[in-house]
Amino acid sequence: MDKELKSQVLRLFLQFVQKHVPLSEAVIASLGGEGREAAIWQEHGIPDSNGWLIERNRKRSANLISQLPYRYTSSLASFSRVFRSVAGSSRGVDAFHLDLCGTIEPNIDIARRIIPLVVQSRGRCLAITVADARRNASVDNFGKIEKWLSALLGFRYQRMRERLEAEQGKDRELAIMREIGFFFSITDLFLFYGRYRMPNRVRRYAYISHTSGAPFPMRTYFFHFSDKPQRIAAPKFARYLYGEWFKEPLYDLNRPPQEIVRTKETVVMSNGLKRLRAMAEAAGGEVLEALESLVAAAGNDRFTKFMGELTMLVASHGGQQLVASPTTSGKRKTTPGRNGDFLEAQVELLKAKAKSKVAYNKARIEVGMKFLEGPGRKSKKKAALTARAMFAQTQKGHRGGFMKRLAEHRPGLLNDTLAEYYTGITGVEVTLQDLRKEAGLQ
């Protein structure tokens, strides 16, 4: 068997597809390249009429046509139209491998045309391969991407960074930034006319490929989609995708798999989770959703911190505190996006909400646009949804946490004027003393 790791990933993708549709019936497509992938298709019995190769380079395309029996087209941009003209408008592609030989960021608009073909198929499988060592637009625009994801994911963003550091090493900051940027791009790629294509399984691979003659770090992501898109808000989709992203570990093919050991800590955590889930269900669906996301992202070596965050989460929504929230140092670790201009923007939304509905709707778009910069499409609807998520973090059970962050990072904003905003919004008198008490200052 070919020991090239990329070839192993290609075979693993066919195994992934086979769980949803027999390979003898699967319609599959990929960028042609040197024909390596199509040769693997032949090994696995993909019928000649069911394979599609896309290759713009004339020399390569001539070799593909002469050596392989599959269908051929020269343009990824026109593939959807060509495929439907041959297979019919009701047919889809069971498995598509988008092997970009680069990065996803500059190819979002072209890649977007492929997704409907995949989703309307029986298999609904997508693989995306990206280069991990080339200059990346996500790294160049990382500050803006971090703001956007922090607004959508809230506390989960910091959990994402911690999980990626545990998987890839704290010294691989650029690799972590590239994966976060890829996640950002996917949240845009899977959006169609206000509806999200919902991946219900995500698998991630990292490996060194030698297909070009020299060692080159690559990453390949497998996605399987549910059969129906959903019209949901951007924050909810981002949280959903985050949960799916970390249900399975990163498969690093460059090193042998490590045995998972069930430690005493994991046994204790399992018992504690039963009680926490019951409390979360009583507190409300949003809390339960957040709990499940934390569970998906937790690692055994971070048990203490994980349980502390769970306890704080439930307690902040009216649940009984089960255990003390332990910390390893006297300093409180802050979450990116919850400080500075993010907090000031939240106060602006409170001000507008207290003033009038018209002022609030206008402020939602203006504030949301500030945190919607970077790659991908901007829209007023997206901006308003982002700002609404920011505003929600200042209300009801979240208000105490918001006051604590203000007291720590923007104490000047914790004043009588802020109390007046809350009075105007709730219709119940709120004093500065009330807010200071919620912040733990009294």
Image (cartoon, rainbow, N blue to C red):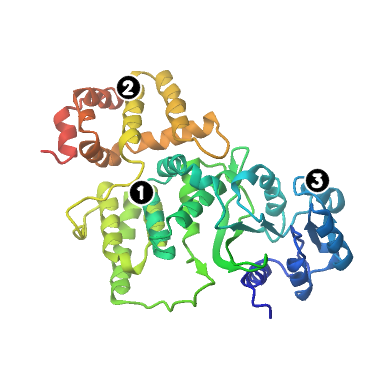
Of labels 1 and 3, earlier in sequence is 3
First in sequence, mark 3 or 2: give its number.
Answer: 3
Q: Is any atom of residue 318 visible in this view?
A: no
The alpha-carbon separation of the residues under discs 2 and 1 comes to: 26 Å
**Residue type, label 1:** Phe
Amino acid type indicated by mark 3:
Arg
Mark 2 is on which residue type? Ala
**Disc 3 target residue:** 81
How many labels sit on residues? Answer: 3
> Considering only vertical position in the picture, is 397 above or below 253?
above
Image height check: is 249 above or below 104? Answer: below
Residue shown at 54% from the left, 51% from the top:
182
Looking at the rendered structure, the secondary structure element under dot 3 is helix
Label 3 packing within 10 angstroms: few (<14), some (14-19), many (20+): few
- The image quarter containing residue 292 is bottom left
Looking at the image, residue 441 lies above or below residue 222: above
Q: Which residue position holds label 1?
A: 155
**Location of the N terminus (image quadrant):** bottom right
Name the residue at 10% across, 38% down. Answer: 442
Q: Residues within 10 Å of mark 2 (few under 14, many from 20)?
A: many
* Picture coordinates of residue 11, whole percent (x, y): 67, 72
Label 2 sits on a secondary structure element that is helix
The percent position of residue 8, horizontal first and vertical second, equals 64, 73
- For residue 191, which quarter of the picture? top right
The CA span between labels 3 and 2 is: 51 Å
Q: Secondary structure at mark 1?
A: helix
Residue 439, given in percent of the width and then of the height, sits at 19, 39
10 Å neighbourhood of mark 1: few (<14), some, or many (≥20)?
A: some
* Horizontal arrangement in the rendering, residue 140 relative to residue 156 (left or right): right
Q: Which residue is mark 2?
A: 354
